[in-house]
Image (cartoon, rainbow, N blue to C red):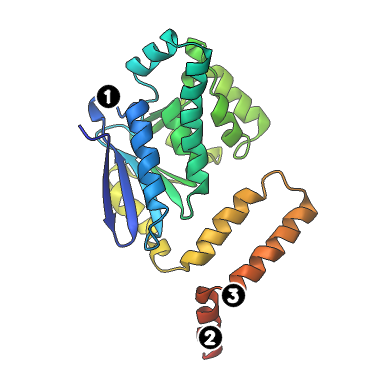
Amino acid sequence: MTEILTETENSILTITLNRPEKRNALNDALIDSLKAELKNADTDETLRAIVIRGAGKDFCSGADLSALQKIAESDVLENLWDAENLMELFAQIRKIKVPVIAAVQGRALAGGCGLATACDIVLASESARFGYPEVKIGFVPAMVMAILRRNLSEKKSFELITQGFDFSAAEALQMNLINRVFADDSFDEEVNKFISPYQTISRSAVILSKKLLYQMDGMDFYKSLETGAEVNTIARLTEDCQRGIAKFLKK
């Protein structure tokens, strides 16, 4: 079975995790396939956004049994390589030029919740469940912490990663971990509606905005302003901006 399925429509690429019988659990083949497809997508100048979703009832349930068995049987260096493989996927999502959107139905747990959280935008069905249960088996949701600490308060992050409980889409929305919650029966329609602005607004402006937003992580206030001024200057010289200014002046 192919680990992922892809479909491009109206400049939007949909990548579907295709292990429904395993609740789309992460393994080496799935992670490698996803990384390869994202790398390929980043070279496509026609794409405006990427959507990641899961086949079947769940988005992604984390590592599967074979992956856990591999961890138990591997030495330190092998486990480091395994952890870095997932780390590279999370980092890659931030480096992809266009927005990467998680469309979560069912369960997004452990590494699957990490995958959703790593995306630029998270959309969820009202029955979706999230959680970082790694501590229950002695694991640490270590790489996800880098993302959580940029999304949530220190206290809320501590609670989620040290208690390991799962929580609803409504609760995830309340803590600002996700962007929107849509009804189950109209989820696909609402996701398409949410994404549709990316088909018409300036691609270059969105690309520059995404890069700048994450580039500002760790910068002090004045360095952020300085970098913002540099990107502002670059944006003014893009074809989209020049065309937009000309159109505005003709009104």
Crowding near the residue tagged with mark 3, few <14, some 14–19, many ≥20 C-alpha atoms within 10 Å: few
Residue at the spot of label 2: 246
Would residue 178 be seen by someone viewing this image from the given angle?
A: no
Expressed as whole percent of the image width and height from the top left, the position of residue 193 reads 35, 58
Distance in Å between CA atoms under marks 3 and 1: 48 Å
Q: Earlier in the sequence, mark 2 or mark 1?
A: 1
Nearest to viewer (mark 3 / mark 1):
3
Residue 206, placed above or below residue 2: below
Expressed as whole percent of the image width and height from the top left, the position of residue 144 reads 54, 30
**Residue 74: which quarter of the image?**
top left
Q: Which mark is residue 237?
A: 3
Residue extending furthest toward the right:
222
Residue extending furthest toward the front:
77
Distance in Å between CA atoms under marks 2 and 1: 53 Å
Expressed as whole percent of the image width and height from the top left, the position of residue 167 reads 46, 28
Q: Earlier in the sequence, mark 3 or mark 2?
A: 3
Q: Are marks 2 and 1 in contact (CB under 8 Å)?
A: no
Crowding near the residue tagged with mark 1, few <14, some 14–19, many ≥20 C-alpha atoms within 10 Å: some
Mark 1 secondary-structure assignment: helix
**In the shown orientation, is residue 125 left or right of residue 240?**
left
Q: Residue at x 38, y 32 (%)?
A: 31
Residue at the spot of label 1: 22
Mark 3 secondary-structure assignment: loop
Would residue 83 be seen by someone viewing this image from the given angle?
A: yes
**Residue 160: which quarter of the image?**
top right
Amino acid identity at mark 1: Lys
Nearest to viewer (mark 3 / mark 2):
3
Q: Earlier in the sequence, mark 3 or mark 1?
A: 1
Nearer to me, 122 or 239 = 239
Distance in Å between CA atoms under marks 3 and 2: 13 Å
Q: What is the number of callouts on the image? A: 3
**Residue 224: which quarter of the image?**
bottom right
